[in-house]
């Protein structure tokens, strides 16, 4: 919506500039024609060129109100200006005519409209100037100067005033106004972006707080339960909630509100799980090998939940009691938006006959479901001691950004 509004503002500014230049140049041309007849004593070609251009360009500008095609209006005006200026220049001294500087105004108008038009009219005007010069130095001049000797200085003065006023009083003034509006719009956009970032941070902060509240409620609920299995289920649910809460906590604490640094997230998550399940003084060694990558929230949360399930299973069933153990988490990028995650432990493992299809374990089923959610695949490596998984997945929505 904001982008659409900005485009409308730019279009209105461009329309205003083109129409204003057209009106001014038409009026000045008609005035110039009158001056040629009654003050400068120029009766051939030049006053008629001014008169014709003034009337036709005025009609062309008024017609814009009906067809609303700015490109058509601009192109007609530019071609008429080019033809009229070239004609007046030829009949008022050629390469020595003071009116030749009006050709530069056409180039300026072109660049104000688009770079392509500016380049086109620049090259076209350079060609016309060279042709005018060639006509002047030729042995036989096809066109002669129709400005009387007594009017040359006054004609030069009016031509220069005409050019300077259009360039400074119309183009310069309006371009400055347009620049001021753009600067104002830029400041407004920056303020809105800051407000939006603040609101997003607040949302992530509240989501994190809400998830921590849910975690606290689960913890309170588990205290009143004697059954170890139910207590374990509540603890697993609590860890899953914390896994999501950490993502939102990292998002609102950092400048980048769309992605999180995944290495620090996995390190924090894994350390929390070890403390939560094994206690603060455990014999567990964590090996986290993850490059400096940022993942968006749509990928970070399901991948975090997947890591949570594999590490939780390793701590509960793989490395039992107070035994020493090692948990490794390794992430590698293989394509622009494809990754391979290796998660494993050196615990006692479990039978290869047990799969997510025939197992009653929610954690095992979640690992496979989360892999599919990440548009990936999961394989168990049976050649190593313990339980090891290789998960190949894709960054959801292709929003991955690597940081050197």
Image (cartoon, grey):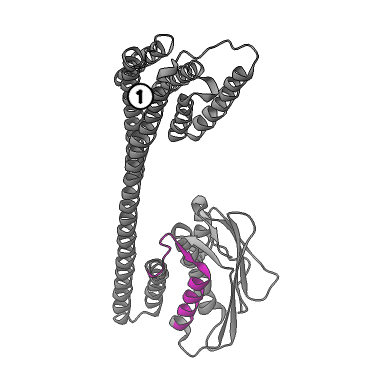
Q: Is residue 346 magenta?
A: no
x and y, in percent, of residue 172 in the image: 37, 39
Closest to the observer: 118 or 249? 118
x and y, in percent, of residue 366 in the image: 48, 62
Name above or below for residue 390 compared with residue 14. Answer: below
Mark 1 surroundings within 10 Å by alpha-carbon count, few (fewer than 14), some (14 through 19), many (20 or more): many
Q: Main secondary structure of the magenta part?
A: helix
Decide if residue 49 is on the left or right side of residue 324: left
Q: Residue furthest bottom?
A: 281
Closest to the observer: 194 or 353? 194
Q: Mark 1 highlights which residue?
A: 25
Viewport quadrant of the C terminus: bottom right
Q: Is residue 259 magenta?
A: yes
What span is colored magenta in the figure?
253-275
Name above or below for residue 152 compared with residue 296. Answer: above
Residue 65 visible in this rendered orientation of the protein: yes
- In the rendered image, which quarter is residue 385 located in? bottom right
- In the rendered image, which quarter is residue 228 located in? bottom left
x and y, in percent, of residue 207 in the image: 32, 65
Q: Secondary structure at mark 1?
A: helix
Residue for point 47% across, 34% down: 111
């Amino acid at each position: 919506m904001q982008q659409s509004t900005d485009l409308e503002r730019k279009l209105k500014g461009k329309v205003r500039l083109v129409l204003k230049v057209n009106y001014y140049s038409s009026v000045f041309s008609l005035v110039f024609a009158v001056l040629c007849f009654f003050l400068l004593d120029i009766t051939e070609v030049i006053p008629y060129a001014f008169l014709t251009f003034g009337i036709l360009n005025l009609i062309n500008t008024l017609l814009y109100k009906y067809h609303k095609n700015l490109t058509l209006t601009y192109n007609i005006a530019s071609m008429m200006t080019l033809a009229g200026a070239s004609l007046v220049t030829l009949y008022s001294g050629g390469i020595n005519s003071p009116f030749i500087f009006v050709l530069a105004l056409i180039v300026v108008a072109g660049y104000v409209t688009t770079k392509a038009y500016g380049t086109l009219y620049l090259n076209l005007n350079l060609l016309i100037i060279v042709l005018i010069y060639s006509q002047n130095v030729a042995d036989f001049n096809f066109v002669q100067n129709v400005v009387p000797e007594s009017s040359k200085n006054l004609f030069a003065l009016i031509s220069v005033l005409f050019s300077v006023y259009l360039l400074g009083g119309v183009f310069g003034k309006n371009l400055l106004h347009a620049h001021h509006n753009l600067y104002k719009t830029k400041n407004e956009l920056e303020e809105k972006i800051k407000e939006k970032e603040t609101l997003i941070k607040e949302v992530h902060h509240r989501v994190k707080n809400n998830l921590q509240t849910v975690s606290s409620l689960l913890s309170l609920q588990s205290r009143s339960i004697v059954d170890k299995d139910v207590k374990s289920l509540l603890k697993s649910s609590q860890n899953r909630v914390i896994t999501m809460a950490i993502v939102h906590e990292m998002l609102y604490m950092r400048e980048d509100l769309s992605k999180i640094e995944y290495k620090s997230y996995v390190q924090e998550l894994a350390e929390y799980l070890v403390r939560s399940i094994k206690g603060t003084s455990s014999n567990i060694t964590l090996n986290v090998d993850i490059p400096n990558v940022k993942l968006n929230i749509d990928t970070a949360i399901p991948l975090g939940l997947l890591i949570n399930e594999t590490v939780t299973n390793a701590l509960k069933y793989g490395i039992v009691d107070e035994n020493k153990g090692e948990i490794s988490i390794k992430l590698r990028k293989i394509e622009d938006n494809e990754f391979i995650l290796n998660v494993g432990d050196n615990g006692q493992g479990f039978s290869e006959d047990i799969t997510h299809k025939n197992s009653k374990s929610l954690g095992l089923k979640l690992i496979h479901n989360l892999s599919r959610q990440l548009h990936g695949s999961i394989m168990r490596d049976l050649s190593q001691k313990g339980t090891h998984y290789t998960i190949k997945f894709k960054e959801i929505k292709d929003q991955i950004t690597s940081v050197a």
